[in-house]
């Protein structure tokens, strides 16, 4: 064994650690240490009155029938708000995605298991038992399938409508890998209130935030074609902030969405699911969200939900009602 100024070296030539040597933190440990604290305006409020009664009813149905929703599994901070207003979100086509976006908590797999042929029936039963008035159905990417999963998504939506035609349906779609034929087959004659697809971030940050197979331009193509195919259906998209964008880029992205006919818009704060995910770049103050809200309305969006705690399915039923002439979904300054 040989000693030197840089530590202890064994006869094999391998450097051994000194007793007083400080271990260097891993990348994950460094990210944990540098994670930004939540600002004071990140507060949620429990429902009261009729909203509390509605939440208790939905929650009771979920517990009694052991149902699963994205709301629970994602530990969404708005679960009381949305359930109290009769809205819930369900994810279909599996629990793992064929893509690896840096912001997303959903697991990634190259070859996912086959689609569950019983899922449409099971989904319809879950929506029925929960007693909601507006159901958001979302999905993982299934790039290994020729149609990106479109036929399965359609089967799920049709099953829910057949069992509960009174429930408003919103589909938050993948980009179907840009397959416009699959999109046409999905939407043809489908009973649907809202077709949603999220651009996620401003165009400049695609390569930083999203999987390499996704892009702002491809998302715009899907949204444009959905509006062309079904002008009777409202289209919707969502932007996360806090991933490296500027205020001006957010407004520019809004304008691009309006150019392809998007009707509904949500903008919310990105929160990293874990230290392994893309770190939060900033926390825009509530006043900035208020400015974006005003800008979006001036651009002509029919309904807007813009705030730190807003998610793509936030108050989805109310957002649809607002677009149809109802009250504003989220008033600036509202808790």
Image (tube, rainbow, N blue to C red):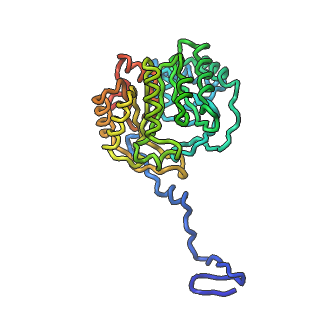
Q: Quadrant of the C terminus?
A: top left
Q: Residue at 47%, 44% (x, y): give it.
A: 271
Q: Quadrant of the N terminus?
A: bottom right
The relative height of residue 256 versus residue 134 in the rendered view (above or below) is below
The relative height of residue 291 versus residue 168 in the rendered view (above or below) is below
Furthest toward the front, the residue is: 181
* Front residue of this view, candidates 232 and 66: 232
Q: Residue at 60%, 38% (x, y): give it.
A: 143
Q: Residue at 36%, 35% (x, y): give it.
A: 256
Residue 177 visible at all: yes
**At which x and y percent is residue 303?**
36, 25
Horizontal side, residue 167 vs residue 108: left or right: left
**At which x and y percent is residue 199?**
45, 37
Horizontal side, residue 219 vs residue 329: left or right: right
The relative height of residue 302 versus residue 174 in the rendered view (above or below) is above
Occupied quadrant, residue 332:
top left
* Front residue of this view, candidates 260 and 54: 260
Residue 60 visible at all: no
Q: Residue at 33%, 39% (x, y): give it.
A: 252
**At which x and y percent is residue 30?**
51, 60
Occupied quadrant, residue 231:
top left
**At which x and y percent is residue 178?**
52, 35
Q: Total label count?
A: 0
């Amino acid at each position: 064994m040989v000693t030197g100024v840089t530590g202890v070296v064994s006869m094999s030539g391998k450097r051994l650690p000194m007793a007083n040597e400080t271990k260097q933190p891993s990348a994950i440990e460094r990210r944990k240490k540098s994670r930004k604290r939540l600002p004071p305006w990140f507060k949620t409020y429990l429902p009261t009155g009729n909203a509390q009664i509605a939440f208790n009813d939905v929650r009771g149905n979920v517990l009694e029938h052991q149902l699963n929703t994205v709301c629970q599994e994602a530990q969404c901070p708005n679960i009381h708000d949305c359930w109290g207003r009769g809205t819930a979100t369900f994810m279909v086509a599996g629990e793992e995605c064929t893509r690896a976006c840096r912001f997303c908590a959903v697991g990634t797999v190259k070859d996912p298991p086959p689609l569950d042929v019983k899922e449409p029936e099971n989904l319809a039963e879950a929506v029925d038992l929960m007693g909601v008035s507006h159901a958001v159905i979302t999905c993982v990417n299934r790039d290994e399938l020729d149609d990106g999963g479109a036929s399965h998504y359609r089967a799920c939506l049709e099953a829910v409508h057949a069992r509960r035609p009174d429930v408003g349906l919103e589909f938050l779609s993948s980009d179907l890998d840009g397959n416009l034929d699959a999109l046409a087959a999905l939407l043809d004659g489908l009973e649907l209130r809202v077709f949603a697809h999220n651009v996620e971030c401003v165009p400049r940050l695609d390569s930083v935030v999203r999987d390499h197979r996704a892009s702002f331009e491809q998302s715009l193509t899907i949204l444009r074609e959905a509006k062309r195919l079904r002008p009777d259906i409202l289209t919707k998209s969502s932007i996360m902030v806090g991933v490296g964008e500027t205020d001006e880029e957010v407004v520019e992205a809004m304008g691009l969405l309006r150019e392809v006919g998007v009707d509904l818009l949500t903008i919310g704060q990105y929160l990293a699911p874990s230290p392994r995910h893309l770190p939060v770049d900033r926390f825009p103050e509530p006043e900035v969200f208020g400015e974006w809200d005003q800008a979006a309305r001036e651009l002509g969006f029919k309904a807007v939900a813009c705030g730190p705690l807003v998610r793509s399915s936030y108050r989805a039923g109310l957002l649809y009602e607002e677009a149809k002439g109802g009250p504003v979904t989220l008033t600036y300054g509202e808790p």
